[in-house]
Amino acid sequence: MNSRIRNKQSQRTGAMAEKLCEIALRQAGYRLVEKVEAPRTKTGIYLRTCSGDFRAVGDEGRSILVECKWRDQQHLTPCCFADHQRKSLIEHHQAGGVSIIAHVTPRGCRLIYWPEALEILTPASDRIAAGREEDHG
């Protein structure tokens, strides 16, 4: 299969995952759910990174930042995230916001909250060094 066809399929899958994520966020009671769009050139090249895929407002006006990931497998790993995505979610949480990972699979969308989300974002070697996990190797 050529790369152009794969890219189109990937775009359709991504759009479907984002729609499922948006529905899950609204069902969870979040308001003002908005897709974050990074600016692109006419040829589709991103001009900059953005902090997440969705922004919303939670209880008492609390800021919500969501990174949406479509994966066929049941588990996300740190390698599923770019450095800027990881950094944005962590900084947003540290600033008092709610950072969420929306894991979309063929079975549906699961919203993952802190501290479980941090465990997904942090490589095992970093968790071992911080004393949060035993080294079983």
Image: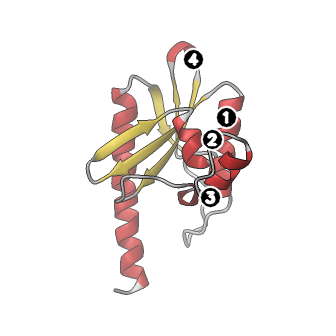
What kind of element bears circle 4?
helix
Sequence-wise first label, 3 or 2: 3
Judge from the rendering whether residue 69 lies leftward or rightward of residue 41; answer left or right: left
Sequence-wise first label, 1 or 4: 4
Where residue 95 appears, as percent x and y from the top left, is 71, 28
Judge from the rendering whether residue 27 lies leftward or rightward of residue 91; answer left or right: left
Q: State whether residue 44 is above or below residue 88.
A: below
Q: Amino acid at mark 2?
A: Leu
State the residue in front, 41 or 73.
73
Q: Quadrant of residue 78?
A: bottom right
Residue identifier under label 1? 92
Q: CA distance from mark 3 to mark 2?
A: 11 Å
Q: Nearer the viewer, mark 4 or mark 2?
A: 2
Dots 2 and 1: beta carbons under 8 Å? yes
Q: Residue at x 63, y 45 (%)?
A: 51
Dots 1 and 4: beta carbons under 8 Å? no
Quadrant, the N terminus: bottom left
Residue identifier under label 2? 89
Residue furthest to the left in view is: 107
Residue identifier under label 4? 61
